[in-house]
Image (cartoon, rainbow, N blue to C red):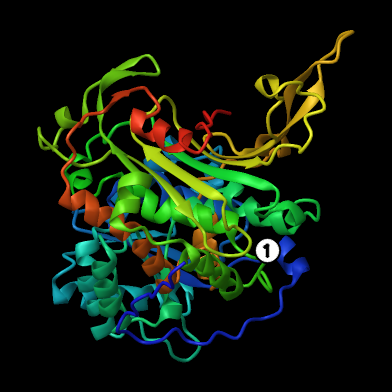
Amino acid sequence: MSPKVLKEPKSQPLPAIHEKPHDPEQAGNPRPAGPCVVVIFGASGDLAKRKLLPSLYNLQVNGLLPDEFAVLGVARSEMSDASFRKKMAEGLKQHGTVKIDPAELKKFESRLFYQQADYTEASTYKTLKSRLADLDEKLKTGGNYLYYLSVPPEVFDDITNALGKNGLVKEENGQWRRVIVEKPFGTDYDSAVELNRKLSAVLTEQQTFRIDHYLGKETVQNLLVFRFGNGIFEPIWNRRYIDHVQITVAESIGVERRGSFYESAGALRDVMQNHMLMLLSLVAMEPPTSLQGESVRREKTKVLEAIKIMSSEDVLRNAVRGQYSSGTVEGDQAVAYRSEEGVDPESPVETFAALKLEIENWRWAGVPFYLRTGKRMANRNTQIMIQFREAPLPLYGGSRMSRIGPNRLLMHIQPCEGITLQVRAKTPGPTLRTSPVGLNFNYSDLGATPSTGYETLLYDCMMNDATLFHRIDTVLNSWQVVQPVLDVWNSIPPREFPNYSSGSWGPQAAEDLIERDGHTWWKPGC
């Protein structure tokens, strides 16, 4: 196996971080975050209304926000504080995950403020600085600011530069300033390096929180607890006992009204490069030395570094792309991708991608990881399936043709959240027959409060816990994994698009990809 060299971005090195010992008692009893203002750029958009404000409301009702707290929405739309509060309250009632308490809502609304702004105008940031100083004085927020960039990537640089020029990211006198950057972080390896160069001219790595909302989901976080908190699984979490791993992120919806965006993204950039490779890293990482941010992030990055980079020939064999045609999805008629609003009628953009990846280290050598994602699939489901090797002697299977099959571990991420361990058991009756049964754990069984997936991430950022956020080397390694695929797909136009019907599980080529190795795709479901 040839060594792999990662090009280093020309930016400041990652700072050394001195970690505090993990305190299990504190982890089990989280304390409220300290005083701060959350500044949301792009506050008039769907993300703020559907996810960010409901998440902050959930943190409030769970006692995890301080009294010295405010949200300042910043966007181009013209609104007053009162109209912003009304719009966010309506969004909370429509998209919130918990029952609204009138007293809590009134308290929450009183913390919401708004500023109309043009992100490229210098006057915007002078007004912002004055507004923040006013909130600090009135609400005792201490000069601590969390900036959330819920805006298109092309204005990341404009905003952070302006914040820097106006002293709004300078940390002094115990005050902290942090920036959450939404995906996508670049459109390929080189653009990610360039974006990081621009951001790191203003922000330190410790101030930069690259978010992936998938890592806020309960089952994703539970992967670490499941692996490292249970002594029975870690000994078999390796090539000796695991046959292969499948990760599926299936969406039943199409591109909706995001056709123009999707034309510049595609499934590989939109889902595979970030969400799916991060899920893979959590499945495959080595045990960290602690649960502090850098220990966990270090091990995730090592996994991505160990993934074999595909040659052009590998891409042609181990990567599949697809584009949906018309069909029926869950009983509803769906149009073809090329008929969606904002989409080129001859678009070569993939709405489906599948990869076979290999991790070249001692734990996983020879264990294939199959990843697939697509729109207009048979149903909406995100699931990790870990298939174990079969027992060496088929005592209960009889002939090879009637073998009982392997055990599987299913990590249900969405829409249902839980874990299923599939084992074999005797079927009731006078004869010896076996059937698969599932040992199930569902988060709903715990009476857990439904969440948006952003609560943990926002709270962690306020608490300066970067465990679930991406370091720049992690991002660059993930781009390096998919870059050869992008290069080949850009150089060879697809000849058979569209190649799968809406409501199916993707193109036949994806079935061929996994069947060559004697496997089949697991059909995910709750």
Quarter residue 289 falls in: bottom right
Quick one: 168 or 280, which is closer to the camera?
280
Residue at 30% over, 85% down: 167
The extreme bottom residue here reads: 173
The extreme front residue here reads: 399
In this rendering, position of residue 396 left or right of residue 149: right
Up-down: is 405 above or below 131? above
In this rendering, position of residue 512 left or right of residue 367: left
In this rendering, position of residue 92 left or right of residue 383: left
Residue at 34% over, 33% down: 509
Regarding mark 1 in the picture, which secondary structure is present there? loop
Quick one: 173 or 357, which is closer to the camera?
357
Is residue 147 visible from the viewing direction of this image? Answer: no
Up-down: is 25 above or below 387? below
Is residue 12 visible from the viewing direction of this image? Answer: yes
| Label 1 sits on residue | 30
Q: Where does the image place residue 335, in percent across and percent down from the top left? A: 22, 22
Quick one: 83 or 318, which is closer to the camera?
318
What's the amino acid at mark 1? Pro
In this rendering, position of residue 152 left or right of residue 106: left
Q: Where does the image place residue 238, in percent across and percent down from the top left? A: 67, 55
